[in-house]
Image (spheres, helix red, strand yellow):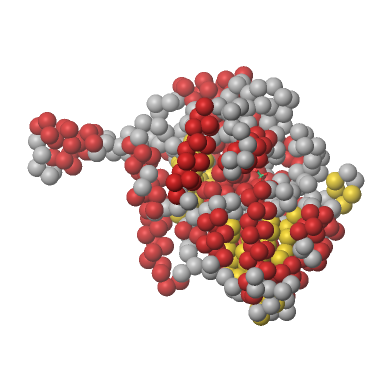
């Protein structure tokens, strides 16, 4: 893309420059950090200088990020391939301001659903809604993709606030998932939440039907112990879920952006409506920052630009998300869907092909665990992996402050090590101090060299509260949005998941041996033959 040429030239000119040397400029820490409320984003440990940043900001401006942002918040149908508005931000709008779609204020509906969810959650938590065997002790959310990852990630993240029934999450159609979960619960004291925007997703419906059979084995009115989160009221009622336990949302909420509304019900039940509101307020605070801060001080914009610099300009294929916060263990998976389902595209909004990769591969694990697994490659492998660290200044375990100190020290050590590395001279001196000499000293020293100059960013927040989690999720949502606008793609559809679904439906009868596989490719035929033979042998 021509619009990236200037940036590519800048990157090429500076590819061998040391990041460390950029700190000679006294204003670097001012220019390459950004604050949103109490949160600090530090992107100074990247090979970006004022010239590069200015060019990136120019790119955002010329791509019309600000106008597109206004269009999104104004309810315009920016999801053009599906003809839909994109208004997950309305779900966290507690300001009293209207939000219009086609001239209609959607806020009365949003707030009405929020109030209904709160009544339901409170009644459940207080034992006013009970199961056949008494108070509900377990809640199982059955859903997949955005109907699973958001609440599953957030329930884990906010477990210090969880004082309601235990929450469980079943996503995979693999019978192992539901079996292992049902084993932990009693039908008489369990609530099943079927979370599916479309209520057609085969994994979710199959798991829900299995859960219904399990419930029926012990409970005389099983429907009463089901709730549904869906846009399709007809389908939920066909399933037998009472209308007052169905929480709906509109088509302007995309699956991977839906944790803020009914899809967050399991989270609300776990942490209580008040904490859930704090989570919404965190998201809304980031929305305000995104809408009001100038581009050069706008955290989602800067996060997006750093991502673009690394992926589209420098050509680094992947991005590691490394939360030094064990409770954010599922955040990398959540961000995988957010980024890769949104921006993993090869066609621009106009239908023309993109001549540049639109979305990086996102992956990660919490620190410090990852350090003892894949960081070897990050430090000494040939490919460069930009790392996005995140950490809280404090943990929730007041009596374990020394753990948090170690966690923080490790997080800071990693970004420092990636940037500074260790030279051959230093490695030689270390080896010499162990008594090695000659060729062996040289050989051993070479294994202990760290090239350094590897980019990373750090997002640091006071503590992982519901408010902060809301900020972090909204920050990344908007980052993905800005990247998408600059690439000129639609970040809100996901046609790439459809083909596999269609083929899986067609393959069902072939797996069961009920249809002829002769029109399939040789590999698929051989795999089917293996399955049939293996099943005969084991049955
Ligand atoms: O297959 C992709 C997808 O459509 C995701 O975008 C979505 O989050 C997930 O499936 C689940 O969809 P639903 O909530 O309609 O069951």
Position of 18 with respect to 263 (left or right) is left
Picture coordinates of residue 332, whole percent (x, y)? 52, 48
Picture coordinates of residue 380, whole percent (x, y)? 33, 37
Picture coordinates of residue 106, whole percent (x, y)? 84, 53
Q: Nearer the viewer, residue 242 or 98?
A: 242
Residue drawn at the location 66% of the way across and 64% of the way down: 213
Q: Quadrant of residue 264?
A: bottom right
Residue drawn at the location 17% of the way across and 33% of the way down: 443
Q: Nearer the viewer, residue 409 or 243?
A: 243
Residue drawn at the location 13% of the way across and 40% of the way down: 432
Rendered position, 358 above or below 287 = above
Position of 264 with respect to 110 (left or right) is left
Q: Determine if residue 110 is in view.
A: no
Position of 369 with respect to 470 (left or right) is left
Rendered position, 94 above or below 8 = below
Q: Nearer the viewer, residue 165 or 60?
A: 165
Q: Determine if residue 380 is in view.
A: yes
Residue drawn at the location 63% of the way across and 36% of the way down: 515
Q: Nearer the viewer, residue 182 or 140?
A: 182
């Amino acid at each position: 893309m021509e619009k990236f040429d200037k940036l590519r030239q800048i990157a090429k000119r500076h590819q061998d420059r040391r990041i460390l040397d950029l700190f000679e400029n006294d204003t670097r820490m001012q220019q390459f950090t950004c604050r949103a409320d109490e949160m600090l984003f530090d992107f100074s440990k990247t090979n970006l200088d004022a010239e590069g940043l200015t060019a990136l900001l120019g790119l955002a401006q010329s791509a019309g990020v600000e106008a597109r942002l206004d269009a999104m918040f104004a309810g315009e149908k920016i999801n053009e391939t599906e003809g839909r508005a994109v208004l997950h931000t309305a779900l966290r709008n507690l300001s009293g301001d209207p939000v219009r779609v086609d001239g209609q204020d959607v806020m009365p509906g949003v707030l009405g659903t929020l109030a209904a969810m709160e009544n339901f959650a409170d009644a459940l938590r207080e034992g006013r809604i009970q199961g056949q065997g008494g108070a509900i002790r377990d809640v199982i959310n059955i859903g997949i993709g955005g109907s699973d990852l958001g609440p599953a990630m957030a329930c884990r993240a906010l477990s210090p606030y969880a004082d309601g029934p235990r929450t469980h999450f079943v996503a995979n159609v693999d019978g192992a998932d539901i079996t292992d979960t049902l084993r932990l619960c009693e039908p008489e004291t369990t609530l099943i939440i079927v979370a599916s925007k479309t209520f057609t997703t085969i994994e979710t419906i199959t798991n829900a039907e299995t859960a219904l059979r399990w419930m029926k084995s012990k409970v005389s009115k099983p429907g009463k112990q089901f709730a549904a989160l869906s846009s399709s009221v007809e389908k939920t009622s066909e399933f037998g879920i009472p209308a007052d336990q169905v929480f709906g949302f509109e088509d302007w909420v995309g699956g991977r952006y839906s944790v803020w509304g009914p899809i967050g019900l399991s989270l609300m039940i776990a942490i209580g409506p008040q904490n859930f509101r704090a989570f919404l307020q965190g998201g809304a605070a980031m929305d305000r920052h995104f809408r009001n801060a100038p581009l050069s001080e706008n955290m989602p914009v800067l996060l997006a630009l750093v991502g673009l610099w690394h992926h589209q300009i420098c050509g680094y294929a992947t991005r590691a998300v490394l939360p030094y916060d064990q409770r954010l263990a599922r955040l990398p998976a959540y961000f995988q869907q957010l980024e890769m389902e949104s921006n993993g595209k090869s066609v621009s909004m106009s239908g023309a092909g993109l001549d540049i990769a639109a979305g990086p591969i996102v992956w990660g694990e919490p620190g410090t665990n990852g350090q003892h697994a894949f960081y070897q490659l990050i430090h000494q492998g040939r490919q460069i992996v930009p790392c996005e660290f995140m950490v809280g200044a404090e943990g929730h375990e007041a009596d374990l402050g020394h753990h948090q100190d170690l966690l923080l020290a490790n997080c800071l050590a990693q970004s420092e090590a990636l940037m500074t590395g260790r030279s051959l001279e230093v490695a030689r001196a270390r080896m010499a101090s162990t008594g090695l000499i000659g060729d062996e000293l040289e050989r051993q020293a070479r294994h202990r060299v760290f090239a350094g100059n590897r980019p990373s960013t750090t997002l640091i927040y006071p503590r992982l509260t519901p408010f902060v989690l809301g900020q972090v999720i909204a920050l990344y949502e908007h980052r993905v949005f800005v990247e998408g606008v600059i690439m000129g793609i639609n970040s809100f559809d996901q046609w790439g998941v459809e083909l596999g679904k269609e083929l899986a439906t067609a393959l069902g009868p072939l797996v069961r041996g009920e249809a002829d596989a002769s029109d399939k490719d040789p590999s698929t035929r051989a795999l089917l033959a293996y399955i049939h033979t293996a099943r005969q042998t084991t049955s």
